Amino acid sequence: MGNSARSCLPLSCLVRDDADDDKEEKQYQLPWLLVCRRDNYMEKRLYNVTTNEVSSFVFRIHPFEENIGSFNSCSRGWLFFMDYKSYTLLAFNPLSASIFHLPPFDIRRFVDLRMVILSADPLLVSNFEVLAVSYGDTLAHFKSGHGDEFWTYSDDSIMRNGYRISNFIFYKDRLLGAYENDAAETITLLHVDVVRGGTAGGGRDGSIKIIKEIAWMPNLKGFESEEVDLDFESVEADVDFERKEVDMYVVVYLVETTKGDLLVVHRYSENSEEDDEIFRAYKVYKLICHSHGHDDDFQFQLIPIEDLGGDSLFLSPFCQHSLSVLAADYPGCMPNSIYYASTESEMEIEVFNVEDERVSKCFVPTEYPTRFPTTWMVPSMKL
C-alpha cells in the first residue's frame, strides 16, 4: 500500500468490509510513534517503543496541495489539516491512505484550529462524531450519518463564563471536557451537550452548551517544591531545588482505560532559564460515577490513584486521543506506566512509573529522530 493508493471518499464509503472484526482488536492495540529519517524529513515511518524497531513501511503525511500547511491535530490515527482557502477541515489516514473532507467552517464563528477529537475511527464505524476547537475556544461539532452539511457551534456562554477547556473526550455517550480554573486552583470536568440543528431551541446550526460541572480536582502547578513526593534523581541533574516557589504549567489528558474507566492525567513541568522544558510530576485521577436510580441523577467524583491496573498510557502533545493498552499483552511494555512523546527532544521518550514515581527514558534510534510534530498511531496493518 503506497502513496499512490490515496483516495478521497464520501464519509459513507469509509468503513471497511472487515471493520467489525477489527474494531475490538484495534481499540487497545499498541501504538507506534511517528518518526522520520534524519536525512529525509518527508520519509515517515513508525517506531515500536517495546521492541526498539522501526517499520519498513514508508509513507508521507502530507498528501495535499502546497497551500495547505502541516497537520494541526491527530486523533485515532487521523491527521487533520486546514484548507484556509475553502475553510474546510481535511482528514488523512496515512496508513490506509484514506482522505475525507468535512463541511467548511463559518469563518465568522470559527477561526484558527487548535485541536480535533474523533469519537471513533471512521474506518471502523459508519456513525462517528467530530469535535473541533479553535484557539479562541469556539467549539464546532459534526455528526456523520445525519445528512448534515454544516457544523454545530458553541453558544457565547462558554466564552462569557471564561471556560478555557484544555482537552475533550467522547466517553460513554457523553462529551466531557477538562477546564483549568486558575482562580480556584482547580481543574474541573465539564459535561458538554450538543443540541442538533432542527431540534427544539437548536435552530439550523444548533448549539453546544455546558450542562454542568461534574467533578473537581486540585491544580498543583503552584505547589512548593519540597511538598512534591517525587524522585528527581532520574530526571534532570541541574534542576534548581533551592527555589521554593515553582512556576509550573500543566497539560491535562483524558484517557479511557482498557477496563472502561476514565482517567484524568495531569502532567506538570516548568521552563528552565534556557527555556527548555523540565518535567516535574504526574498526577492521575479516576472518575467514579454514583447512580441514585435515575438515568439523569448521577454524582461524579475524581479520586487520585497510584496504580493503572496493569495498563500503560501513551500521551503526546499532538495526539488529542490518548491511548491505553494492557501491558501484559505486549512483552517489553512497562505496566502502570505513562509513555510521553515530548516535542522537546527528538531522541527521547519519557516513561513515568505511576506506582513508584520514577522516570526513565526510551531512546529512538539515532537515524530516526522524532521531529516536531510527532504523534502515536495505531497501525491498521501488520508492520
Image (tube, rainbow, N blue to C red):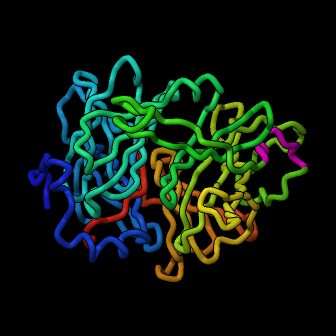
Q: Was residue 154 drawn as part of the magenta stretch in this picture? A: no
Q: From this viewpoint, which residue is outermost toward the left?
A: 4
Q: Position of residue 286 (x, y in %)?
A: 68, 62
Q: From this viewpoint, which residue is outermost toward the front?
A: 200
Residue lying at 27% horizontally and 77% vertically, measured from the top left: 21
As drawn, 73 above or below 48 = above
Judge whether residue 161 can be spotted in this image.
Answer: yes
Nearest the viewer among 219 and 346 is: 219
Task: Name the image quarter holding the N terminus.
Answer: bottom left
Task: Name the image quarter holding the C terminus.
Answer: bottom left
From which residue to which does the magenta span run? 218-226
Q: Was residue 220 drawn as part of the magenta stretch in this picture? A: yes
Judge whether residue 278 can be spotted in this image.
Answer: no
Residue lying at 36% horizontally and 70% vertically, measured from the top left: 26
Q: Position of residue 165 (x, y in %)?
A: 59, 37
Q: Is residue 334 left or right of residue 247?
A: left
Nearest the viewer among 379 and 33 is: 379
Total labels: the figure holds 0
Q: Position of residue 182 (x, y in %)?
A: 75, 33
Q: Is residue 208 left or right of residue 185?
A: left
Q: Position of residue 62 (x, y in %)?
A: 24, 41
Task: Name the main secondary structure of what is drawn in magenta.
Answer: loop
Where residue 203 sits, quadrant-wise, is top left
Residue lying at 21% horizontally and 61% vertically, measured from the top left: 15
Q: Is residue 209 left or right of residue 276?
A: left
